[in-house]
Image: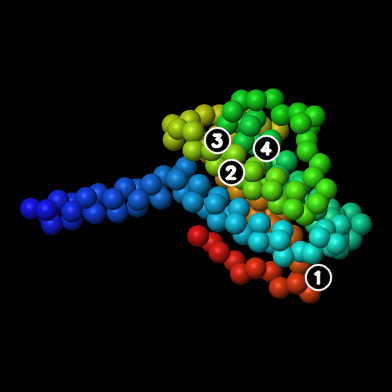
Amino acid sequence: MKIKNLLIAFIVLISNNLIAQNDAISAFLLKWENSKNYLIEIADAMPEESYNFKPIERQMSFKEQLLHIRTNMVWLSETYFMNENFTKTGKINPTTKKEIIEELTITFNKVSKIINQTSLDDLTTKVDFFAGSKSKLQILNLLQDHVTHHRGQLIVYLNLNNITPPKYSGW
C-alpha cells in the first residue's frame, strides 16, 4: 500500500510540474530566471574597463545597455502589473560593474515576485500602452523580448572585444 501511495504522490508531483510549465506565468518565471542568469554572465564577462565601450557613437555603451534593460524592467513591471506611476526620479545610477550587476539581479528578482503575484486571469486585462491597447500577457512577453533584444547587442559587444560570450542556456 505504501508503494502505491508513493507512486500516486510521485505522479501528482510530476503532473503538477508539467502543468505549471504550461501556464503562461510559470513558463515565464522559469524562462525569466534563466534569462537573468544568462544576462548576469554576459555582464560579468565584460571587463569593467570596457563597460563604456560602444561600437559606434549612436549606440549605447555596454553599461548604458545594461541600465536600459533594468529601467525597462522596472517600468513595465511596476506600471502594468502594479499600477504604479513610473517616474525616472527613482532612477538609480550605479557606477561600478559590481553595482550594476547587483541592481540587475535585484530588479530581475523583483519582476519575478511581481509576476508571481499576478493571476492567470489578470493576463487578459487590457492596459493602455503607448503602442495601443495591449493585454498584460503581451506586456509580459515584451518584458522578456526586450531583455533578449538588448542581450543580443551585448553579445556583439563582447565579440567585438574578442571576448567569448557565455554559452547560451535557453531553459
Circle 2 or circle 1, nearest the eye = 2
Q: How many residues crowd around disc 1 within 10 Å: few (fewer than 14), some, or many (20 or more)? A: few
Which amino acid, by three-letter code, is at mark 3?
Ile
Query: What kind of element bears circle 1?
Result: helix
* Discs 3, 2 touching: Cβ within 8 Å: no
Q: Which residue is mark 2?
A: 109
Residue found at the very far right of the displayed protein = 57
Q: CA distance from mark 1 to mark 3?
A: 36 Å
Residue 114 circle label:
3
Q: Give the x, y percent position of residue 162.
A: 79, 74
Query: What kind of element bears circle 2?
Result: helix
Q: How many residues crowd around disc 2 within 10 Å: few (fewer than 14), some, or many (20 or more)? A: some
Which amino acid, by three-letter code, is at mark 4?
Val
Q: CA distance from mark 3 to mark 4?
A: 10 Å
Q: Which residue is mark 4?
A: 74
Query: What kind of element bears circle 4?
Result: helix
Earlier residue among tags 3 and 2? 2
Q: Which residue is mark 1?
A: 160
Front residue of 13 and 146: 13
Front residue of 27 and 114: 114
Drawn side of residue 160 relative to residue 79, left or right: right
Q: CA distance from mark 2 to mark 1?
A: 30 Å
Circle 4 or circle 2, nearest the eye = 2
